[in-house]
Amino acid sequence: MKRIFKLIFFVSAVLFASCNPADPDNTATLDVKVTPGEAGIDELTFTVTSENAASCAWMCVEDGTTVPSGTDIMQKGKTVFANTEASAKATGLKDNTVYVIVAAAMDEADNILTSTPVKMTTLEKPAEPKVTLSDDAVEGSTFSFKITPADAEKCAYKLYKKSQSAKVDDVLSTGTEVSATESTTVTLENLEDGEYFVVAAAQNGDTKFLSSKLSFLINTAIPSYSINPIKVYCSYKASNGKDFMVRFVFVDMKGSNSNIALDFVLAESHDYVPAGIYELGAASAPKLDPEYTEQVITDGINGGFESGTCNVSIKDGKYTFDVNLLRMDDDSFNPGEMLSFTWSGVVEDMPIL
């Protein structure tokens, strides 16, 4: 009987020893780490790997700020699946900026382990491309202009009829490509009579830009006339800085002082008329208001204009107005004719500030 009791005691002791949690073969080690992935302009991807964890989370902070503690990460961080290689992404970040990514894991006993912080840098955002059109001129059936790109990898232009619409992808894919790094003067010859516009587009990476349109009229069959202004002044400026009346005084056929009144409507408030292309009756500002843009003849009937543009440029504190406006077929002078003139100088009562 004593031998039987000794045997039972021995077996029990062996079983108790095999279940002892202090046995190193049964110790579960908590572990968590962050492995860098790919960087974008405003996002970072990475992997969070944890072992023997009940839960896991991560945080991404800008370098130079306080790295969050394990408790903060578990309470405020973004959670991922535990005990696996979990893919994660930090979004809404600044470009060309160093960030610190740190993760934390917690086991069933609420023990928290924090990973070694990992630094990653977002990519630099490419410069936004720009392109402008200027120095336009019409001579007979020929139209010329200058294209000036900036921060572009690709640049192209395209000619459209007035009734058409321009899209940036259409210009880049079907337009005529020009230098993306320097200005180019373009000459379009043998154009048929009609109203046209040109636009240019620039591209840098995935970013695209469409210029303002440059409208013009080819009128080889339409008679034209010109004026020689003897005085140019601003007769009206709206209190909101968005409407200016500029008058070009000239001597008419009767020897009297008449004037051409151009009513400039702006999109934003200014102290003077800024450089740009002003189309008569355009759908939106900047534009020339056809209601108040007119030919004012002394002792005669005022005449309106049907279509056309005024190209305004500024250099060395002086204006240049390149005017091409088609007169209405009315009872005033020069009905149905094209008014074309260029004037350069200082506009009275409208200093360039």
Image (spheres, rainbow, N blue to C red):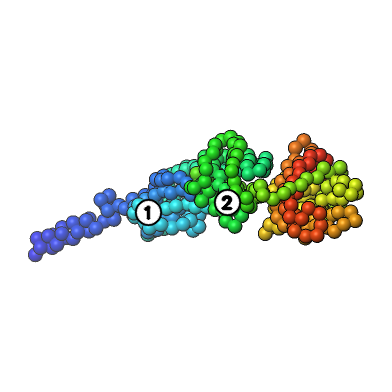
Is residue 274 toward the left or the right of residue 13 in the image?
A: right
The residue at which mark 1 appears reads as 86
Residue type highlighted by circle 2 = Tyr
The local secondary structure at tag 2 comes to: strand
Q: Residue at x 75, y 37 (%)?
A: 315
- Mark 2 or 1: in front is 2
Residue 52 position, x and y percent, is 34, 54
Q: Please name the amino acid that badge 1 sits on.
A: Ala
The percent position of residue 332, horizontal first and vertical second, equals 81, 57
Callout 2–callout 1 Cβ contact below 8 Å: no
What residue is pinned by disc 2?
A: 160
Q: Secondary structure at mark 1?
A: strand
Instruction: Name the quadrant containing residue 322.
Output: top right
Which quadrant would the C terminus be assigned to in this image?
top right
Which is more toward the observer, 10 or 68? Answer: 68
Q: Judge the density around disc 1: few (<14), some (14-19), many (≥20) Cα neighbours within 10 Å.
A: some
219 sits to left or right of 81: right
Check the picture and name the quadrant holding the N terminus: bottom left
The residue positioned 9% from the left and 60% from the top of the image is 3
Q: Earlier in the sequence, mark 2 or mark 1?
A: 1
Front one among 61 and 122: 122
Closer to the camera, 229 or 211?
A: 229
Q: Which residue appears at 63% of the width and 52% of the height?
A: 195
Q: Where residue 228 appears, x then y in whole percent? A: 82, 42
Q: Which mark is residue 262?
A: none
